[in-house]
Amino acid sequence: MTSAPDLTVLRVPVSDPRVRPLLRELGDEYSRRYGKDAHAELSRYPDEEFTAPYGGVLLLLLEAGEPVAGGAFRRYDPETAELKRIWTHSAHRRRGLARRVVAELEREAAARGYRRVHLTTGPRQPEARALYLATGYTPLFDTDADPETIGPLPFEKHLPANRRAGAAVRTTAPTGKAATL
């Protein structure tokens, strides 16, 4: 695995055209793995749940102006952010970008006062399961059980207090202006 290069981190609305590759590839990937049209699953939550006024965010990582990875969170409860839509472009995998996305989302969640992160991944996504275990998430399921017998695999991670106090995220707003949260 090579280290991730300098990337631009953007907070964007779901309607931003640069989000389309994320949604398209996630839908295609889920459909291949689960044998049904999963694009509807990506529409399960209203877009506004991934905006600041509703306690959420959608981040894209850009390299040379092109989206190479991204992810989002939504408010799960007043103290918990729920990670959703973690994605790395198919041409840019195995570069550590998913770890970077998760770290950026955790920083953003901590900066917004969340104390915990929750997520689920599908039983046919061993790469995602390995990512969350490798980045310190606690599985809320029997890791020895056949994942197909469990269904969605839940994980959690408590955010350290020092990351909540004074945490900063370097990002670029949709206007293209750099901002620190």
Image (tube, grey):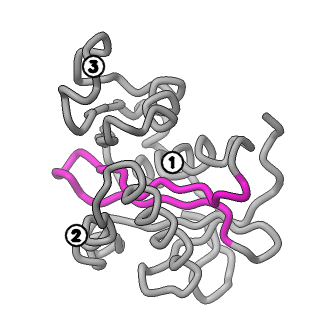
In this orientation, which residue lies closer to the viewer: 31 or 108? 31
Q: In the displayed image of the protein, which residue is found farthest to the front? A: 35
Q: Which of pointers 2 and 3 indicates the residue nearer the eye?
A: 3
Tell me residue 172's x, y (percent): 64, 74
Residue range highlighted in magenta? 67-92
Q: Residues within 10 Å of mark 3 (few under 14, many from 20)?
A: few
Task: For marks 2 and 1, give the CA distance.
Answer: 22 Å
Kind of residue at badge 1: Arg
Please tell me whether residue 70 belongs to the stretch shown in magenta.
Answer: yes
Residue where numbered disc 3 is placed? 146
**Could you tell me which residue is drawn at 18 percent across and 26 percent down?**
149
**Could you tell me which residue is drawn at 42 percent across and 60 percent down?**
72
Residue where numbered disc 2 is placed? 45
Dot 1 or dot 3, earlier in sequence: 1
Task: For marks 1 and 3, give the CA distance.
Answer: 32 Å
In the picture, the quarter occupied by the N terminus is top right
Mark 2 touching mark 3, by CB under 8 A? no
Q: Secondary structure at mark 3?
A: loop
Q: Is residue 146 placed above or below 179 in the rendered structure?
A: above
Tell me residue 24's x, y (percent): 48, 72
